Image (tube, grey):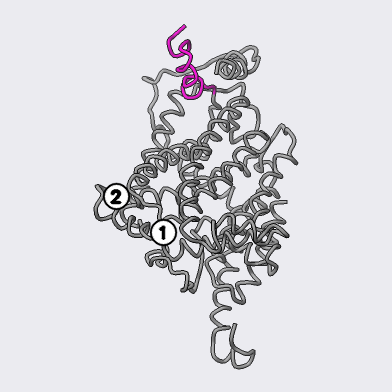
Amino acid sequence: VILLTNQLKMGKGFGNLAYVRNQIWFTLSPYEQRPFAKAIKTGLPNTLRRITEEAPYVLPPLLLGYAIYSWTTSEAHRRSRKEYQAIHGGGH
Amino acid sequence: MTFRKSHPLIKIVNSTLVDLPSPANLSVNWNYGSLLGLVLVIQLVSGIVLATRFSGHSDISFDSVISIYQDSNYGWLLRLVHSTGASFFFLFIYLHIGRGLYYGSYIYPEVWNIGVLIYLILMGTAFLGYVLPWGQMSYWAATVITNLLSAIPWLGSILVEWVWGGFAVGNPTLTRFFALHYLLPFVVTALVILHIFYLHLYGSSNPLGVSSNTNKVSFHYYYSVKDLYVYFVFFFIFMFFTLKYGYSFMDAENFIPANPLVTPTHIQPEWYFLFAYAILRSIPNKLGGVLGLVLAVMVLFLFSISSTQLLFSGTIYSPLARLTFWSLVSVFFLLTWLGSCPAESPYTEVALASTIAYFSLMV
């Protein structure tokens, strides 16, 4: 347990992460800012931008998958018809 | 030094949940780990209380479940919570693995391999638990899955009878399945602790896939509050689902007591196993199907072997990798749907094509 906690502490604790030089911090007091500034005006277009940037990678495979599902379902329905079974032979 | 950093036990909690350096830019996809921990606790608590009311003998186990509903205080709620919790456990583990594939979390081999082991044991636990109510689907799912062992050359049939404790699935099988179902979640808990230990050696990855050592925040308050917020959202969705659609994932066949003389027309597992079931059925050969089933999960181990430490990890820097990932998701959905379809044409051909696609995309 002691070894465990020492490893946890020494491995990646604050102070052992990275050496960063010349850090300059600029900050604004929370009393001098509106908490939801531009949440809709900038936030909504940004959300739409993030969605449209992902869409070319997400939509084509999912749409193809849906097309395969749709075709398979209609094909199964067609193969269960009396006309198809009469031509190709019924039974499993 | 403050108490939380000096006390020998509290400092473990401190270094895991309070002073843990965490990347500042973790998204919701990093919440699934803590959600899995929550669902594990829910399953453990609900499961242990159910076990105090359940009888593990094949003559009375089905009736003991009815008795849990009718005679025990809030037994109906416990049972629904436990069965819905299993579904949510698998939902979150698939999202967690998907996050790992998308963002390249497999570059941490110990974390990844322990995670895959947890997933494997979880699948075993869920299967064992499903057998316990001793309904029609419980009995026949147990028969189908244990019979897969007979595909092993030479030792197969002896192994199956050893697992059964007889010449068919029966009371000895149910008894040992109950014992194992009680034991394995504690094995999972121990592995989860190891999983988190190894993760904290490296530090969490982040959505950008680059080192975040220059931009860390402490876990408390940022991620303790974020996790707590998502816990509340999960609680709302979970209780809504449990109370309103608690039976939507249950198979109607499992409301009929097990009958070895009557086989259900459509034997199928719960939704979280359907993709593996589709792969199993798509290969015409018995041993081939079993190998396909096993490899469908074991292929995850390959990721940590083949990957090297990259400056930019994950699929987000490669358009082809992102397309491959989402194709894999699409094939996974297809296979899940096909696992619930009858084993007839054209489903079998599409399942075979999907199996080939699944392994091609994984490799």
Q: Which residues are magenta?
A: B1-21
B95 lies left or right of B357:
left
Label 1 marks which chain's residue?
Answer: B
| Residue at image location 34% in from the left, 43% down from the top | B49
Among the 4 quarters of the image, the one containing residue B46: top left
Eyeballing the image, is B126 above or below B266?
A: above
Label 2 marks which chain's residue?
Answer: B
The residue most toward the top is B1
Q: Which residue is mark 1?
A: B58
B133 lies left or right of B163:
left
Residue B290 position, x and y percent, is 66, 60
Camera sees residue B282: yes
Q: Which residue is mark 2?
A: B75
Residue contact between numbered discs 1 and 2, judged by CB atoms under 8 Å: no
Eyeballing the image, is B250 above or below B39?
A: below
- Which comes sooner in the sequence, label 1 or label 2? 1
Q: Nearer the viewer, mark 1 or mark 2?
A: 1
Q: Does the magenta segment cover residue B354? A: no
Which structural element holds mark 1?
loop
| Residue at image location 59% in from the left, 16% down from the top | A3
Residue B256 position, x and y percent, is 38, 67
| Residue at image location 39% in from the left, 24% down from the top | A33
Eyeballing the image, is A33 above or below B156?
A: above
How many C-alpha atoms fall within 10 Å of the one at disc 2: few (<14), some, or many (≥20)? Answer: many
Which structural element holds mark 2?
helix
